[in-house]
Image (tube, rainbow, N blue to C red):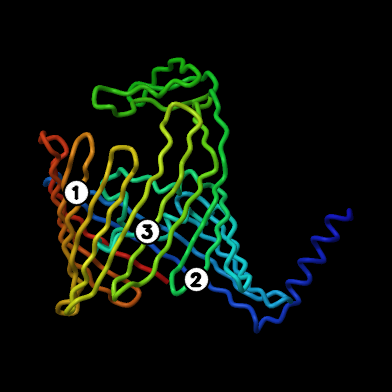
Amino acid sequence: MNRSKIIASSALASVMAATAANAEMSISGLYAGTLTDADGGGLASGFSSNSIYVSYSDSMDNGMGVSVAMSLTAAGLLTDVNFDTGMGVIGLGNGQDSSVDKLDGSPACFSLNVCGGAEMGQFDDGDAKSGDSVMYTNSIMGWTVKVSRGESVASSAGTDGMQMDIDDGTLTTLAAGADLTTNADDEVTTVRLSGTAAVEGHDAVMSYATKGSFMGATIAAGLSSIDMNGATADTDPSFVTVSYSLAGLDLGYAMYDGDNGNEETQMGVGASMGGMDVGIGFYSLDATTDSDKMRVSVSKGMGAASFGLDYTETDVSGTDTGDADEWNFMYVVGF
């Protein structure tokens, strides 16, 4: 047995010999399903989340806390390792997200569906480009402060390959860096069989966010710095959210600035009525093509399961294309 294996075996033995009373482990899962009827086109089913979570926490000999969280989702296996130093928590792993992504949830959303800065599909919080990241979290005068640094990605020109038409199976060449074939509606009509796509690299994503209370309101704000290494412009997307409870009503406001000509504003109000949670939200996108959205949401938690119903109207400025009325029934089951 070589030296590295001996060291690894010794470390594993030390961990297994730790007092079980000091350790905590949990397993949980979540399934979120949907039934959608858009513009009376009939029901379509799907799921927005399907995950299994395993978490473990313990303390080291020096008193520092350590925790590991693993989640198996449709995106693959995500892992977080966090060390509580007593002067803040240092997190490592591909499940850390960006600091902005951790805190940019919208208080103007009352749906069981996850919604936030991407409500209208325009806000990039830096999470997808962070990859394996390092995050520092601390509490300063009652405010949570997060700073994260993602991994950098090198640019690649791609390689030549082949593509196949989805409808008739026709094979054609696909040059390095070329996009898959699309039709007049910009829908992709082929699949890649060989070769690799071009990749525009980027520097390590830096992300900063904070959340706390001020005069009874809960406020969150943050900014990510995304520096690309190609034709795509660098951006510094930012957000601000404010929530406040007044006379049994939950009031929410959110602003997401993509720093790319797209700015989304959200406002909403929610309340508990007759044992159910109800809410209405208004979302406005200021972009090359402006659009507005209104959603009414009703939901009820019933222990291990929750159920919700949304009605959403979308209005795209200057055209009927993109306008939609949609009903969405949701069910969430957890264990």
Asked if 145 appears above or below 236 in the picture, the reply is below
Q: Residue at x 46, y 45 (%)?
A: 225
Residue 111: horizontal and vertical position, in percent?
24, 62
Name the residue tied to disc 3.
221
Is tag 3's residue or tag 1's residue first in the polypeptide sequence?
3
Residue 68: horizontal and vertical position, in percent?
59, 65
Name the residue type under label 3. Ala
Name the residue type under label 1. Ser
**Quadrant in the rendering for residue 331:** bottom left
Q: Callout 1 environment at 10 Å: few (<14), some (14 to 19), or many (20+)?
A: many
Name the residue tied to disc 1.
284
Whether residue 134 sits left or right of residue 51 in the image: it is right
Mark 3 against mark 1, which lies toward the viewer? 3
Q: Measure how far apart labels 2 and 3 are at the Cα level.
A: 15 Å
Quadrant of image for the N terminus: bottom right
Give whichever of 84, 132 is nearer the camera. Answer: 84
Quadrant of image for the C terminus: bottom left
Q: Residue at x 23, y 38 (%)?
A: 287
Whether residue 51 sits left or right of residue 253 in the image: it is right
Q: Measure how far apart labels 3 and 1 are at the Cα level.
A: 19 Å
Name the residue tied to disc 2.
139
